[in-house]
Amino acid sequence: MRRRLILAVCVAVLICSAVCVVAQDRQNAVSAQSPSSDATNHASIFVGSASATRPSAHNSWSASSDVLHSKVLDARAMRLEGEKRFHTNCGRCHLAPHKFPPRAMATIIRHMRVRALITDEDMKYILSYMTQ
Amino acid sequence: MQVRTSISERQHLSSQRPKQHALNRRGLLLAILCFASQVFFVSAVAAQSADSQPPNLQSPAFSSVSTSDEAQDSTPNSPVPVLQTSAGFLTLSDMGEAHVHPLITPVLLLPIGQRWLFETRATFESDLAEQPGVNGLHGVVQKEVEYAQLDFIANPYLTVTVGRFLTPFGIFNERLYPVWIRNLASDPLILPIGIGPSNASTGAMLRGGFRATDAFNVNYAVYYSASSTLSPVDSSRFAGGRAGLFFPKARLEVGGSYQHLLQDDHSNLFGFHFAWQPPALPLDIRAETARSNTGSGYWVESAYRLSQLPFAQSQFRRAQVVARIQQFYTGPNSANSVLPVNTNMFEFGINYYFSDDFRVISNYGRQFAPQGNGNVWTFGVTYRLVAPLGHGDIQ
C-alpha cells in the first residue's frame, strides 16, 4: 500500500513537472518570436526613455552612438538583474564575496550551479554581474 | 487459541516476507524509473526549447560556461581550476570541558571542458582536549575526503554526478555545513539522520534546477548510494531524492526529502526543509525536520543582521545575532539511535563579519537531557580563501 502511494506521488510529480516544462516551453517559444529577451526588455526601458527625445533623422555617427549607448545600458540592466538574482540565490547561504577574475568566477559559478541547484538563467545573470 | 492464531499469522507473514521484499524492490525500481523518465522528459523538452531561448548574455566569461554547442566552439576563455580553502579555529567549553578545534578544509574545483567539473573537498581537523594524567591539550589529526565527485552538466535541467557526494537529505549537509557559512558552530542534532555514516554517499545522482513558472523554481536530486565499508569513505546502501520549490520574489524555499534504506531494516526516512529570507529584512529563517527509525527531530534557526539599526550603522551592520532551538527524539531502533536519549537544545550566538570571508563567532548553548543539563560555550574565527590556479583574467 505504501509502495502504491509512493508510486502515485512519483506519477503526480512527473505529471506536474511535465506540465510545468511544457508551459515553460510554450513561454520560450513565445519569447523567441518576440525580438527581445528579458535583459533586452530591461535595456529597452532605458534606451526607450532616452531615444524618445531624439530627432527621427539620424546620421551614421548618431547611429553608432546609439548602438554603443544601448550596449552600455544593456550591460547596466544585466548587472542590475544579476545583482538582484545574486542576492536572491547566493545570499540565502552566504554573504557577497569579492569579485574574482572572470575565468575563476566561471568555475565557481559552475560549482555553485551543481551545489546550490541554481537555474541556468540565474547562473548566467549572476556570472555576468560577478564578472563586471 | 488467540496465541496460536497470532503465531500462525506470524508464520504466514514470515512466509510472505520474501514476496514483500520483492514487491518493495519492484516498487522502488518503478519509482526510480518514474523519476528517471521524468528527468529525461524534462531534458528532452529542454533540448527542444534550447534553440528558442534568445541568448542575450554574451559576455566572454558567460560564454565559457554556456551549455550550448555554439558557445563551446566560440569561446577562447575556458574556466580555470580554483582552490578554495576555509579554515576555522574554535575554542569550546562543552559541559565544563575545554576543547580546541582547529580545522582546515580545502576544496578543489577542476573544470574539464565546457560541461564537466571535478570537485573534491577534504577536511583536516583535530579535537584537542585534556587527557587524564597528561598536561595540556592533546588530540589526533583526522583526515577525511568528504566528497570527490565528477559532474556532467547535460543540459540546463540536468546534471549527472558520480563518485562520492554529499547526501542531499535536507539542506544543512549540502549547503550550510562549511565552517565559513554556518551561523552556529555546532551541528544540528538531527544532522546524522539520512546522510549516511560519513555524511556522504558513494554512487550516482541526477540533479538540477529550473524555472517552472515566473513564480517559482523547481530543484530536485535523485540518488543511489552503494554500500561501502572502506573507512573513511564508508557509506550505506540506500536510494532517495529531494525536491524543493523556490519562490524568488518571496525568497522562500520549501521542500522535502525521502530515502529508502536498502540494507538493515529497509526503513524509510523523511525530511522537510524550509528557508525564508524576507526581502524587506536582513533576516534568515531556516528549519528542518527529519524522521527515521534511528531518531526524529527538528531545528529552527533565525539569524538577523543588525544593518537596519538607526544608530552606529558602520559598526552594527557587520554584526549578526543568531538563535536556534532544536529537539531530538529517539526512534524505535534505539540501538542505533543518533543520540541515546531525548535531547533539547537552545543556542544563541553573535557573529561579527570583518569581511565577507573573515569573521568572529561566539555561541552559547544550553542542552537539556535526562542525564543532566549543560552549557556549551564556543568562541572562534573562521576564514575563507579563494585562489585561482591559473590566469584568471579573460585572455
Image (spheres, grey):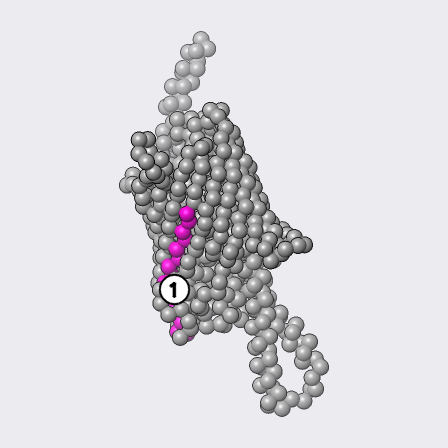
- Residue B18 screen position, x and y as percent: 36, 29
Can residue B67 be seen from the camera position used here?
no
The residue positioned 41% from the left and 65% from the top of the image is A104
The residue positioned 40% from the left and 16% from the top of the image is B8
Mark 1: few/some/many CA within 10 Å (<14, 14-19, 20+) = many
Q: Quadrant of residue B332?
A: top left
Residue highlighted by disc 1:
B388
The residue positioned 67% from the left and 76% from the top of the image is A48
How many marks overall?
A: 1
Residue projecting furthest to the top = B1
Callout 1 secondary element: strand
Check the image and report above or below for A14 versus A29: above
Name the side, left or right, on which A62 lies relative to B244.
right
Name the quarter where the C terminus of chain B is drawn: bottom left
Of B370 and B379, which appears nearest the observer? B379
The residue positioned 40% from the left and 39% from the top of the image is B99
Is B83 colored magenta in this rendering? Answer: yes
Residue projecting furthest to the bottom = A59
Check the image and report above or below for B314 versus B77: above
**Magenta part of the protein: which range?**
B74-89
Can residue A73 be seen from the camera position used here?
yes
Of B157 and B79, which appears nearest the observer? B79
Of B304 and A40, which appears nearest the observer? B304
Check the image and report above or below for B173 versus B24: below
Name the quarter where the N terminus of chain B is drawn: top left
- Residue B63 screen position, x and y as percent: 45, 70
Label 1 resides on the chain identified as: B
- Residue A38 screen position, x and y as percent: 59, 67
Is B284 colored magenta in this rendering? Answer: no
Of A110 and B299, which appears nearest the observer? B299
- Residue B324 screen position, x and y as percent: 55, 40
The residue under label 1 is which amino acid type?
A: Pro
